[in-house]
Amino acid sequence: MWEEAQSRLAVLVSVLLHPAAVAVALFLLLTLCYHDNFLATFGTATFFVLLAPVGITALMRALGGVSDLDITDRRERLLPYALITACYLGGAFSLRWAGAPREVVAAMACYFTVTAVCTVITAFWKISMHMAGIAGPVVVASLLLPKTALLSILLIPLVAWARLVLRRHTPSQIAGGAAVSALVTFLTLLAFGLAP
């Protein structure tokens, strides 16, 4: 009974803190804090971090290119991840072109760089994209939205716990996803002049 309850809670955590959901929440907070044109900026960001990636994954699932929406099979990840990486790059350029605040453009660039690096790693090893999808945004939030830092940092062990309970990843895959994402995100923000 306890294991079943634990498993259900882990599924709930994984769904609520899915990388796409976290991305939308991050861009909502960034746009509210730094907005120039809220609707255009948040709408553009949402298209590129939620609608396009979910659409790509759903289409690939319908066409039989991936077995499930989480893309649990590492061998099936390369094409959708490459396409999603392209979405993030398109998002960064679109936001820049639309005159979005530097912080918002930088956050989208972080999604591009992290996903690009994780896609290359995925060719050889199954890295946890759920952990990458929480650790990077935590770094962004800690540096650009410091009032959210403590709360957001607590999400990292919560997601790690959920992925372990669901047996989706090994501890090293979880640690790898978090470490790669945090480092690449920090370096990307540094390149934008937004990290110390």
Image: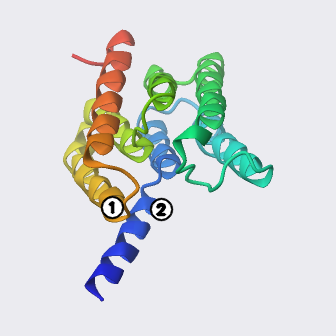
Q: Which residue is mark 1?
A: 162
Task: For the N terminus, give its image quadrant.
Answer: bottom left
55 lies left or right of 46: right
Q: Mark on residue 15? A: 2
Q: Position of residue 175 (x, y in %)?
A: 26, 40
| For marks 2 and 1 on the same chain, the one whose residue lies earlier in the sequence | 2
Residue 29: image location, x then y, percent: 42, 43
Disc 2 versus disc 1: nearer the observer: 1
Which residue is found at the position 59% from the left and 28% from the top? 85
Looking at the rendered structure, the secondary structure element under dot 1 is helix
Q: Residue at x 44, y 42 (%)?
A: 129
Look at the picture and state if 112 lies above or below 43.
Answer: above
Three-letter code for the amino acid on which mark 1 is drawn: Ala
SS at mark 2? helix
Q: How is the image coloured?
A: rainbow
* Residue 67 figure quarter: bottom right
| Apparent side of residue 26 relative to residue 71 in the rendered image (left or right) | left
What's under tag 2, amino acid-wise?
Val
